[in-house]
């Protein structure tokens, strides 16, 4: 597989795990998952990384009526038949799947997702990952896009109630690594990407439209 296809499949796997891949594109991707192990591994890796995004949410106990409706709509228990030689293969496949998921969920990634940057239609377009100290960021485009030769994408950190601080220019085709120097990613700060002239904003502040943003 060439580099272009690698990037495309990784972006599709991220969108699938994030839930933004929909319609016929999602159906086609699901068919590929049934036959391409490498693709399933990519999805498992992204699902593990995205699992930290909702770690701040508190579980809510559903009302009893919900459980009753679920129980009523459950299909009848199927009759168990004996002498099924393929059950051993199914069990082996299940154990292999458990082993694969366990491997991905127990390893510690160097960078974990911090926030997803949405466009103006609230579609996730960039994944911002950070190290445990929040001193290094990685920004990955879910849908790489070409820019005109005279334009650049510029990254900004906007503290709550403060002015934007430039974090540098971004590669629209591949992940960009950003090291923070004496900066703090405080809660409620916003990470944004604006469209600027080639080489970045000439004023030190955003001059073009904000294309993507997300609150930490």
Image (spheres, helix red, strand yellow):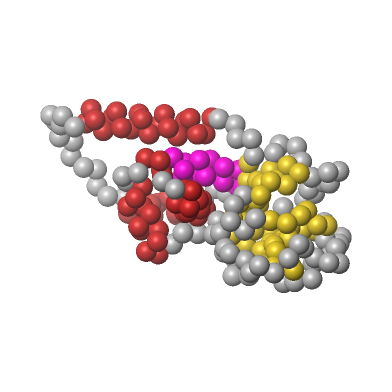
In the rendered image of this protein, does residue 35 appear above or below residue 154? above
Q: Residue at x 40, y 58 (%)?
A: 26
- Residue range highlighted in magenta: 41-54
In the rendered image of this protein, does residue 70 appear above or below residue 94? below
Q: Is residue 166 left or right of residue 32?
A: right
Where is residue 170? Give x, y as percent.
Answer: 68, 56
Q: Residue at x 75, y 71 (%)?
A: 208
Viewer-side residue, 89 vs 29: 29
In the rendered image of this protein, does residue 105 appear above or below residue 18? above
Where is residue 171? Give x, y as percent.
Answer: 65, 55
Q: Residue at x 48, y 30 (%)?
A: 103
Viewer-side residue, 55 vs 50: 50
Q: Main secondary structure of the magenta part?
A: helix
Q: Is residue 184 left or right of residue 109?
A: right
Where is residue 74? Give x, y as percent.
Answer: 31, 50
Residue 110 shown in magenta: no
Where is residue 163? Give x, y as percent.
Answer: 86, 62
């Amino acid at each position: 597989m060439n580099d272009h296809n690698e990037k495309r499949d990784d972006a599709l796997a991220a969108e699938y795990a994030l839930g933004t891949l929909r319609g016929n594109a999602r159906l086609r991707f699901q068919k590929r998952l049934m036959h391409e192990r490498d693709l399933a591994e990519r999805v498992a890796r992204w699902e593990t990384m995205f699992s930290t995004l909702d770690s701040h949410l508190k579980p809510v106990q559903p009302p009893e009526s919900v459980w009753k409706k679920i129980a009523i709509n459950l299909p009848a228990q199927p009759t168990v038949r004996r002498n099924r030689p393929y059950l051993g293969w199914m069990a082996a496949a299940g154990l292999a799947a458990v082993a694969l998921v366990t491997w991905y969920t127990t390893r510690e990634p160097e960078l974990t997702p911090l926030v997803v940057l949405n466009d103006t239609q609230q579609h996730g377009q960039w994944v911002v990952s950070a190290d445990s100290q929040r001193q290094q960021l990685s920004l990955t485009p879910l849908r790489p896009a070409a820019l005109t030769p005279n334009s650049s994408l510029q990254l900004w950190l906007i503290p709550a109630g403060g002015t934007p601080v430039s974090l540098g220019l971004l590669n629209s085709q591949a992940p960009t690594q950003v090291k923070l120097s004496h900066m703090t990613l405080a809660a409620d700060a916003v990470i944004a990407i604006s469209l600027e002239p080639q080489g970045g904003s000439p004023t030190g502040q955003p001059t073009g439209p904000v294309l993507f943003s997300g609150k930490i």
